[in-house]
Every structure is written in C-alpha cells, then in structure tokens.
Image (tube, helix red, strand yellow):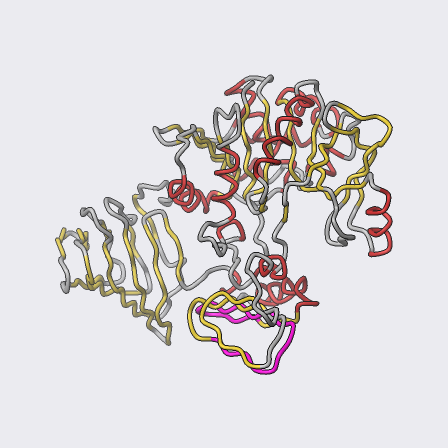
Amino acid sequence: MELIPVILSGGVGSRLWPVSREAHPKPFMDLPDGQNLIQKTFLRASCLEGVVEVLTVTNRELLFKTEDEYGAVNTSKHPQGFILEPFGRNTAAAVAAAALQLEATHGPDAQMLVLAADHLIKDEKAFGSAVASAMALAAEGWLVTFGIQPIYPETGFGYIEAQKETPLKGGLKVTRFVEKPNLETAQGYVSAGNYYWNSGMFCFRVGSVLEELRQHAPDVVEAVSKTIEKSRLTSSTKYRCLALDPESFAEVPDISIDYALMERSSKVATIPCDIGWSDIGSWNAVSELTEPDENGNRFEGEVLSHNSRNNYVNSDNRLTALVGVEDLLVIDTPDAVMIAHKDHAQDVKHIVNQLKACSHTVHLLHRTVHRPWGTYTTLENGERFKIKRIVVKPKASLSLQMHHHRSEHWIVVSGMAVVINDKQELMLNTNESTFIRAGHQHRLMNPGVIDLVLIEVQSGDYLGEDDIVRFDDNYGRADK
C-alpha cells in the first residue's frame, strides 16, 4: 500500500517570537539537540513503512530554505514533491491541493498521512504503530485522526470525543470535535476517559477524502481544482513542484480542514495514542526540552545565576545574568530580547501584533536572512548606509538586478567572486572589491567550491529590500 506523508508547513508561531518570525517560522527553530522541527518531521515521515514520496505544502518563499533543511538530514532518498502556496489559505485548501495532486500522480487508492511541520513526537516506535493502525482504517474508507491521550486538563487544545461502545480495528468512531475548553470542562474530559487531544494529524485514502470533501466542502474542492488548472508544475531530478496560481488561490475559502470536513463527516475515526506528542506551542513547552538544574532553572547558552529559580533562558549570542528572579522566560536574539513571566507565555503573540501594527521589521526578518543562493546578515543600519555580510553557496548566483536608489561597494573576504558590473565581467579574489552605481545592472556569482564571503556597503537615499528589479534569476524570481 502506497503511503505519502504530506507535511503542512504554514503559520508563523507568533507565541515563539523573537526566534520564530514570518521569514523564519517555528518549523525552522533549532532545538537543543541541533535539529529543527521540520527536519524531525521529515525524518519521522520518511522512515515509515510503505512511503513512496514525501510531499510538502509550504509558502513559496520557504521552498529553498526547506530544501536545504531536508538535504542536511535526508538519507532515505525518497522522491520529494512540493506544493507552493502564494499565501496562507488554511488547512482545508492545503489538504485538498495535496489530495488532488496525489490522485493525479499516485491514484485514488494511495494513502496520505497529513503531518504538521512544527510538532514534536518523542516516541517514534509508538508513532509508527499508530500510523499502521490508521492506515488499516483508512483503507476501509475512514477519515482517521490521531487522538492524543490527555495527561492533564489542557485548555489550549481542541478535543476529540470518541464513542466507547463502538470500537473499530485499532481505533474508535468519533462523536464530535470540541473547541478549546475552560479548565473545569477540560478536567471533566480527562475524567471521562473518552476525550483526546486533537493533534491535527490525519490519515486518509486519497479517493475517500476527495469524495467526502466534494460532499461536505464542494466550494473548497472546486476552487482548488480551478487553481491547479492554472498553476505551473515543474519537475527536476531533485523534486516535483506545483506553484499555485495566486489569483485563483485567492478565491479558495479560508477554512480549516476540521471545520470544512472533519466536523461534518460521519466517517471519522480516531486512533488513541500515547506518542510523546507536543505542538511546542509556547516557550514553556520549549523549556521542557532542557534539563533543569538544582534550582529549577533551564539554560541554553552562557548564563550566570544568583538566587534565581525556575527560569528559562535561551541566549546563544551573549552572556546573560539572572539575579533574584523567578519564573521568567528570557529569549535573546541579536536584534530583540523578550522577557515574560511563565504564566503569560501565551501572550507573546500580542507583542507580535503590536510590531505588525507599527510595521516593525523585527516580526518578519532576523538579522541573518536565508536566500536560495545563501544568506545575508545586516551588521549595521544607519542613516543613508547599511552594511551586510553576504555568504554565497558554491556554484550559486544572485539574480541579474538593478537598484534605483542605492549604490553598493562589494569587498571579498574569502573565496572567489565573478561579478557582472554594468557591461564589465570581473573576477575578484580575497581583499579585492568593486563599486556598483545605482541604476547599473549587476550580478554576483560564486564559481568556486567553498563559500564566497563578502562585505556589502550600501549607500543611498532609500535602502529598503524592495528597491530591486530582477532581470534574470536562477530561482524563478525575475520580474515579469
């Protein structure tokens, strides 16, 4: 039986700011063991029995970053596919697009395992067993969810109520889905014994989920089908990629798969499981991944503490000192520091909303920004000047581009650069430089086998990242 894990990589994870940002969302956060959540999800998915492909639904701006993260851990060599959304349209659209694409490539009898890119599962053996049980039910036409055995009355999760008296093979028929409850109601759910946390993971036969979607959410399927008809499908030796048409995708209803289908269908089952699952939904959850010291403190980075208890510090950039404080979360990044009481960890998202309201870029980008060709780090930003450190991967190339408002001075620190500067083509070695005037077409390439590192000094009356016209680009970003 063919199994295709479908990894949904959307959302920002605003409760994990300032590490999680729109251009570097929660799935890409490094955990204490050095891997990030999307790498763990990819590895967990690709190791399952029967997998023939791994399909990822993500934002088109994150394609190359996702490819890099997969490449760093991928040993299975399963074929990969991507569906690229121009913007978020919730999970019903993502599931429908994946199902329609898989029906075309693998047929209606293939099974899709829908996984969130930003969840953590510690017991992978139990997870594999739960997937096997889910596949058996999905083969019979059930839409299968994974219900997590609740270990405490959590008010931040939705719940699944299952029928006790009608057990299925390895699972239970679902009675209803319940919104996030208050504490008293959640305590009742835990005591009842037939309520489970809704993990947001699913297993379907492709033909079954499309049949149910056409019955209960025909507007979603119709709009996604029209979008795919107008979308661009490309294939390479590395992966198959479907870039969804933005104009058509804007017409797709913005609704979750729970609301659109799971709460309406009579063919929903759940696999109760205890798999060490966490949605890593707050800094409190992240802190649990680090062992506490004798005072209950959990530290990532260089931290000194005096008379302080039950704190969590994440600071890789500088020394942090705590004196006489308790129950604090301290998250330090190069351009932002967040300090919160543990009881208010869920409220970090309100700071992100304030940053968006005032158009502060710190909700969007880190100082180091990933691009298909490498990275750039903003070292200093002042009036009429900006200094960046640029790293270009071997054999990679920036776009052929032009700026209206700024000039640039490039100084090679290490490696070798080929530069197109107006009508000249230059070869620059370490300690050599070139000056590019505003209005001149230019391009930077790394012909070598090691990273090219250079310093860029920008000067001009406007230094925004949107002052760029692309004439040619290896990564499909050229202006039409």
Task: State which quadrant residue 343 falls in.
Answer: bottom right
Report x, y in % for residue 180: 78, 50
Of residue 285 and residue 101, the one placed in the foreground of this image is: 285
Task: State which quadrant residue 475 falls in.
Answer: top left
In percent of the image, x 67 and y 38: which residue is there?
253
Give above or below for 264 relative to 149. Answer: above
Task: State which quadrant residue 165 falls in.
Answer: top right
In percent of the image, x 46 and y 31: which residue is there?
81
Give above or below for 365 relative to 224. Answer: below
Is residue 433 within the magenta segment?
no
Report x, y in % for residue 157: 73, 49
Is residue 323 within the magenta segment?
yes
In percent of the image, x 32 and y 48: which residue is there?
373
Give above or below for 418 relative to 383. Answer: above
Magenta residues, start to end: 320-338
Q: How many marks?
A: 0
Report x, y in % for residue 390: 29, 59
Give above or below for 294 relative to 38. Answer: below
Magenta stretch prevailing secondary structure:
strand
Q: Quadrant of the C terminus?
A: top left
Report x, y in % for residue 428: 14, 57
Q: Is residue 402 left or right of residue 217?
A: left
